[in-house]
Image (cartoon, helix red, strand yellow):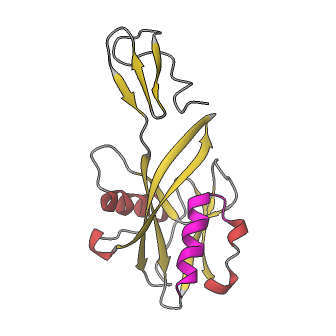
Amino acid sequence: MHYLEKFKYCPICGSAHFVENDFKSKRCEDCGFVYYFNAAAAVACIIENEKGELLMCRRACNPAKGTLDIVGGFVDPEESSTHAMVREMMEETGVEIREEELQFLFSIPDIYEYSKLTIHSCDTFFKMTIPSDITLKPQDDVAALMWIKKEDINPDEIGLISIRQAVVRYLSTL
């Protein structure tokens, strides 16, 4: 199935002659517009405390509702990845951080189903440390927040592929 199979009409002129151009684009045969399917930008952060525990979230929504996750989300238009991480931290935990506190780790591609649509993302991972006694308030799409000892983290309980890969990769470097 082509990435853009569900997109039937040209977003510029509305023509139904919106056809496969190549593996990642469609072209309108009427107005000539070419639309490229690009990955959505997303961010996530591995957060440690002074005890070496990781902050884990319980997902409140699909995809992967009820599984473990880390703080993160999609980058909004006109937003940098670091600003998105600052915003997501506030939205999901109620904790205000500064961009300077974030340390870039790596990036991993991801794919998942959302609202019957396959979403491809490029996930940027950061790391930071916060005190264990900071007041955390689960909100937005987070059902619960918890500190978990690194040795007690079960990757099989992490629902999103790139998040699981990132946590495993991070833990393997310790």
Main secondary structure along the magenta-highlighted residues: helix
Position of residue 68 relative to residue 8, above or below, is: below
Q: How many marks?
A: 0
| Region of the chain picked out in magenta, as a range | 158-174
Q: Is residue 51 magenta?
A: no
Position of residue 112 relative to residue 18, above or below, is: below
**Please, which residue is most extreme toward the bottom here?**
51
Q: Is residue 162 magenta?
A: yes
**Image x and y of residue 4, in percent:** 51, 28
Quadrant of residue 113 within the rendered picture: top right
Question: Is residue 153 found left or right of 163 in the rendered image?
Answer: right
Question: Is residue 54 found left or right of 37 in the rendered image?
Answer: right
**Image x and y of residue 100, in percent:** 27, 73
At x 54%, y 42%, the residue is 119
**Image x and y of residue 167, in percent:** 57, 72
Position of residue 38 relative to residue 71, above or below, is: above
Front-most of residues 165 and 70? 165
Question: Is residue 65 found left or right of 126 in the rendered image?
Answer: right
At x 34%, y 70%, the residue is 97
